[in-house]
Image (tube, helix red, strand yellow):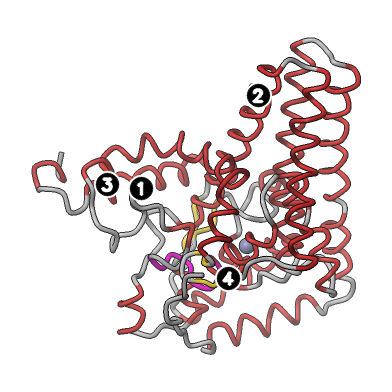
Amino acid sequence: MAGAAPKLAFDNGGAFIRDTRAEVEAYLARGSTRLRGAILLYAKAPIALALTAVSWSVLIFVQPGVIVGLLCLVGLVLGAMLTAFCVQHDANHGSYFKQRRWNHLVGWSTDSLLGFSSYAWRVKHNVAHHTYTNVDGYDDDATQVPLARFAPSQPSRPWYRFQQYYIWPMYTLMGLRWQTVGDLHAFRRGTVGESTLKRPSGWTLFGVVAGKAFFITWAIVVPLLVYPWWGVLAAYVFFTMITSLIMATTFQLAHCVEEASFASADELRADRRIWAVHEVETTVDFCPRNPVLTWMLGGLNFQIEHHLFPKVPHTHYPKIAEIVRRNCVKHDVRYSFHPSLGRALRSHFLHLREMGRLGLPPEIEMG
Ligand SMILES: [Zn+2]
């Protein structure tokens, strides 16, 4: 097992997070606020599950024509999106229940319905990404070298000049990679980014194996009993590529844009930062006034609030955003957001283009 690099340290306190936390706690303690947020959160799991179960059952037991079949596939994609953004993400952060085991049980929907390990996700996402957001080499989401360059501290390569175009097909393949070899490679390496990932054992190992078996059974084995192999393959690839593209893009719009800052480990060691300020300045919200998108994305368009309060159900984020924004102004912390999806996508595209050109010979860099 590879050893993890020395830990990077942040300062955990500061007036900004102290004041913000106090206001957020006062908001959550008000009347039935917590209960209302929990009910709104819990309501999403049956919707996600029903969408998936009904779409799958019609495909398997009714075997409809092309039009209804495609609608069922769209239903499966929507069910997977809701599971990813509104169920497993909250549960694996521990915001569904007080007890860890129940959160892990609901978080197992990652294994059973999305096809990758919730155990590996908790290290990749909760530890590597949430602790070291946009830190080169430490945040797995910000490190895709030598395929793409997201951060200025990563070395330049001639092919990155075209990354703003080829990144999209790359995003469609990420889910496929995690469903097949990604988890296994991470277990063998023993690390995600620079965070330690212990080999699963006991109940954790059972969860990993049973989850993979469950996913392969409903997504591949049972469909093969009623459809030709090429139909199953086409449907599986479509389902995985579309869900992967939506998931990767959603996460990237919050961190891999012009307004977000990046850091290398050396920079952080030389200039120790306040963690809460680092999180706000490496993250960007988008479409904060779009309630439909907010509902669909499980509040992941409010990632600043999510990074500051990952254990609070996402149904509270629009309200918490008002508190965070106010305190950012008060404490002179840079708070960025994109008012529309188009502006966020444009900023992601321009950031990739800038990173692709940075460090190339001037005639190419300027071109
Ligand atoms: Zn998260």
Say which of 182 and 134 sits in front: 182
Label of residue 127 in the image: 4
Residue on which disc 2 sits:
233
Residue on which disc 1 sits:
148
Is label 1 in a helix, a strand or a loop?
A: loop
Tell me which label, 4 or 2, sits earlier in the chain: 4
Q: Residues within 10 Å of mark 4 (few under 14, many from 20)?
A: many
Left or right: residue 61 compared with residue 214: right
Please tell me which residue is depicted at 34% across the width and 71% down the height of the picture: 264
Left or right: residue 136 compared with residue 312: left
Q: Label 3 vs label 2: CA separation?
A: 34 Å
Q: Label 4 vs label 2: CA separation?
A: 34 Å
Tell me which label, 3 or 1, sits earlier in the chain: 1
Left or right: residue 53 compared with residue 73: right
Please tell me which residue is depicted at 84% across the width and 50% down the height of the picture: 45
Q: How crowded is mark 3: few (under 14 residues within 10 Å), some or many (20 or more)?
A: many
Please tell me which residue is depicted at 58% across the width and 47% down the height of the picture: 178
Residue on which disc 3 sits:
356
Q: Does the magenta-highlighted stretch encompass residue 37?
A: no
Which three-letter amino acid code belongs to the residue tagged 2? Leu
Q: Label 1 vs label 2: CA separation?
A: 28 Å
Tell me which label, 1 or 2, sits earlier in the chain: 1
